[in-house]
């Protein structure tokens, strides 16, 4: 049955902090090398939020750009969904901070935490409010200060992550474009392979970390690698099936930017060329849920996307979580 309304992305925005952390700088922090990091991950540098700066500020920068890009004013926004696993505060939510700072006085606001899959979850939640007629314009902003939950004495994780923010405006569209299909999933039984404790930590989680470092990432890299390589391909195939679209019809895949080898692995499983897979992780690192909206904004600004193009976004992350969506580009 045709849905009465469709939800499409009508504006994009992103913001990366100015401060860079290069692989060679990391060589003086932990025992690592530019060569190891590039070979195993594809990452050369990442951006880091200054100590004095709230995450909310870069979330606002990205949000304002997306709202302007959609040709709207903050007062047109009826709901703000923020995704983050590294917020400034548990309360107020990041979404409320963005609402206050942008003057989006007519918007309800809440946060979603699905770790690196957060943007895909937020998009699918926002889509429901548009398709059922509740709202016309929703701001989705994904912002992460991963450097604040990273142990810079743990070489297995500190070389991987970076900070940044990406945002989109999701609006009611009536031209046949917009979100065609989406899949969300979780594998909570394997959640202990990637953790960031907050107010409580299990004995195992305390043992896995350097002493005194409770609120930092710990990860079993090879377990996550195996899950990610499999699920990226599976979630991509399933969303294609749901939408009844063939891979040949897809212009670009925008995957979560964790590791170039995971993207290569997924491309192999999908039997597609890397040309179809958008990537910017070389200079952003893994910015968790912000990675996909930052890529979308970059690709849009580069003129790589035109109205009617079919794209897939696909992510995996802590939880464990995963998700994908197939969109017909609306801008
Ligand atoms: N620099 C140099 N050596 C390092 C290193 C670093 N930064 N990090 C780990 N090593 C070492 C290890 O200690 C190990 O040495 P050992 O054999 O003497 O014990 C060796 O390199 C190989 O480690 P391993 O963990 O097997 O490497 P890998 O090829 O699996 O790559 C990751 C590690 C983390 C890059 C990879 O597992 C990965 O990308 N996993 C997925 C992570 C991810 O995407 N997480 C985010 C999810 S949203």
Image (tube, grey):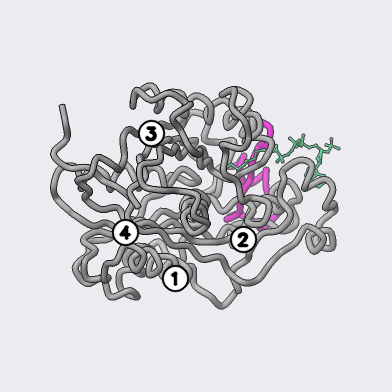
Task: State yes or no: discs 3 and 2 in contact (Cβ < 8 Å).
Answer: no
Residue 304, position in %: x, y?
Answer: 50, 50
Q: Earlier in the sequence, mark 4 or mark 2?
A: 4
Between residue 161 and residue 310, name the one nearer to us. Answer: 310
Between residue 159 and residue 204, name the one nearer to us. Answer: 159
Is any part of residue 37 visible from this angle?
yes
- Confirm or reject: label 4 Cβ below 8 Å from ligand 1: no
- Confirm or reject: label 1 Cβ below 8 Å from ligand 1: no
Q: Earlier in the sequence, mark 1 or mark 2?
A: 1
219 vs 23, left or right, is: left
Q: Which residue is mark 4?
A: 139
245 vs 257, left or right, is: left
Q: CA distance from mark 1 to mark 4?
A: 13 Å
Task: State yes or no: discs 4 and 3 in contact (Cβ < 8 Å).
Answer: no
Q: Earlier in the sequence, mark 1 or mark 4?
A: 1
Quadrant for residue 274, please give it.
top right
Q: Earlier in the sequence, mark 4 or mark 3?
A: 4
Q: CA distance from mark 4 to mark 3?
A: 20 Å
Q: CA distance from mark 3 to mark 2?
A: 27 Å
Which label sits on residue 147? 2
Q: Secondary structure at mark 3?
A: strand
The magenta segment is 203-222
Between residue 45 and residue 241, name the one nearer to us. Answer: 241
Residue 325, position in %: x, y?
Answer: 39, 36
Query: Mark 2 packing: few (<14 Cα in 10 Å), some, or many (20+)?
Result: many
């Amino acid at each position: 049955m045709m849905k009465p309304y469709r939800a499409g992305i009508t504006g994009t925005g992103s913001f990366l902090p100015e401060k860079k952390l290069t692989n060679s700088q990391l060589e003086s922090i932990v025992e690592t090398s530019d060569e190891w990091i590039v070979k195993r991950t594809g990452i050369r540098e990442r951006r880091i939020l200054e100590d004095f700066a709230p995450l909310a500020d870069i979330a606002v920068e990205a949000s304002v750009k997306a709202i302007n890009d959609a040709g709207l004013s903050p007062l047109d926004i009826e709901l703000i969904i923020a995704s983050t696993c590294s917020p400034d505060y548990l309360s107020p939510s990041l979404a409320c901070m963005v609402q206050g700072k942008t003057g989006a006085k007519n918007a309800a606001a809440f946060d979603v935490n699905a770790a690196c899959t957060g943007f895909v979850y937020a998009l699918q939640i926002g889509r429901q409010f548009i398709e059922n007629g509740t709202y016309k314009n929703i701001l989705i902003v994904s912002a992460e200060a991963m450097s604040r939950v990273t142990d810079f004495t743990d070489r297995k994780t500190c070389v991987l992550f970076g900070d940044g923010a990406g945002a989109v405006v999701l609006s009611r569209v009536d031209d046949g474009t917009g979100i065609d299909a989406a899949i969300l999933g979780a594998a909570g039984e394997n959640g202990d392979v990637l953790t960031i404790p907050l107010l409580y930590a299990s004995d195992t989680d305390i043992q896995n970390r350097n002493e005194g470092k409770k609120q930092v990432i710990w990860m079993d890299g090879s377990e996550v690698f195996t899950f990610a390589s499999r699920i990226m391909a599976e979630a991509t195939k399933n969303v294609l099936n749901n939408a009844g679209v063939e891979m040949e019809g897809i212009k670009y895949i925008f995957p979560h930017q964790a590791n170039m080898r995971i993207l290569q692995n997924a491309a192999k499983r999908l039997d597609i060329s890397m040309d179809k897979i958008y990537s910017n992780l070389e200079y952003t690192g893994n910015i968790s849920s912000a990675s996909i909206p930052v890529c979308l904004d970059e690709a849009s600004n580069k003129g790589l996307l035109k109205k009617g193009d079919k794209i897939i976004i696909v992510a995996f992350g802590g939880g464990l979580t995963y998700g994908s969506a197939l969109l017909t580009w609306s801008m």
